[in-house]
Amino acid sequence: MFITVYRTLILYVIVIISIRLMGKRQIGDMQPSELVVTLLISEIAAMPLQDTDQPILFGVSSILTLVALEIGISIIALKSFFVRKLLSGKSVILIKDGIIDQKELKKVRMTVLDLVEMLRAQQVFDLSTVSFAVLETGGNLSVLLKAKDQPATAQDVLAKKKTAELPLPVISDGKILNESVSALGAKKTSIYKRLKLKGIKPSQVLLMTLDANGNEIIVEKEGIK
């Protein structure tokens, strides 16, 4: 009896530490690799509890190996857009100007009813009010309403709101994202010009977003001049 309690406490502490090391994502926000590691950890932790003849060290070493592997892959993904895309995929635009992209819907193996259900979860009941709906890599649906259907703000009282456009990340961790630049109908030279006007180099940019209206947001890296 004492041995079972002892083994349970050790594995409980190890699993808690492992999950904390992997980050603070909720289950629904996990990337595929994170979810796989989490499921494997739960299975491995259960084995020494069910079979007391199995050395607990085997379970602990396996769990720590998986965590080290996940952390290593995460570090590589931070530096490589290709690896990040390979592991997590990419965001998909399912609705544009109230029109469902049926080809993309089939690619992600979703039905129209699935899409409608996800829209309702975002408090959107009228498809025609949607400017953009994007299926994120974590499986969540991000929705941008058309300008006329968005809740009014104090700024809207003073100025007429422009057509809502989807901001796309054009620079991530100092690297220009060609797909996003092309989707906006822009050129890499225009991105360089925007940065030059602000006296910033692409290598100094952590994140830059741009929309079809020309609105930009630039987040510089800390400690880099």
Image: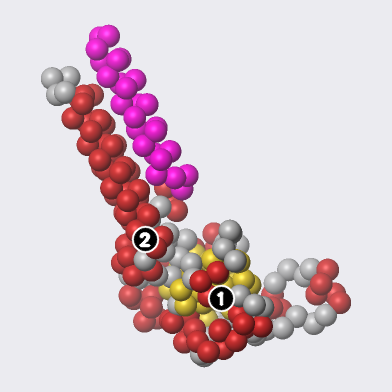
Question: Which residue is painted at 52% across and 81% down in the image?
Answer: 96
Q: Distance of mark 2 from mark 1, alpha carbons?
A: 22 Å
The C terminus - image quarter? bottom right
Q: How busy is the neighbourhood of tag 1: few (under 14 within 10 Å), some, or many (20 plus)?
A: some
Asked whether residue 127 is in view, the answer is no
- The percent coordinates of residue 105 (x first, y second) are 38, 75
- The percent coordinates of residue 215 (x first, y second) are 66, 80
Kind of residue indicated by mark 2: Ala
What's the magenta bit mostly, secondary-structure-wise?
Answer: helix
Residue 28 lies, with reference to residue 190, above or below; the image says above
Q: Classify mark 1: helix, strand or loop.
A: loop
The one nearer the camera, 173 or 35, is 173
Residue 14 lies, with reference to residue 218, above or below; the image says above
Question: Which residue is painted at 70% across and 72% down in the image?
Answer: 150
Numbered range of the magenta stretch: 1-26
Asked whether residue 49 is in view, the answer is yes
Which residue, given by chain and number where applicable, does mark 1 sit on? Answer: 201
For this orientation, the residue located farthest to the top is 2
Q: How busy is the neighbourhood of tag 2: few (under 14 within 10 Å), some, or many (20 plus)?
A: some
- The percent coordinates of residue 143 (x first, y second) are 56, 69
Kind of residue indicated by mark 1: Lys
Q: Earlier in the sequence, mark 2 or mark 1?
A: 2
- The percent coordinates of residue 1 (x first, y second) are 25, 9
Question: Which residue is painted at 32% across and 65% down in the image?
Answer: 83
Which residue, given by chain and number where applicable, does mark 2 sit on? Answer: 77
Question: Which residue is painted at 25% across and 30% down in the image?
Answer: 60
Residue 24 is covered by the magenta coloring: yes
Labels 2, 1: front one: 1
For this orientation, the residue located farthest to the front is 225
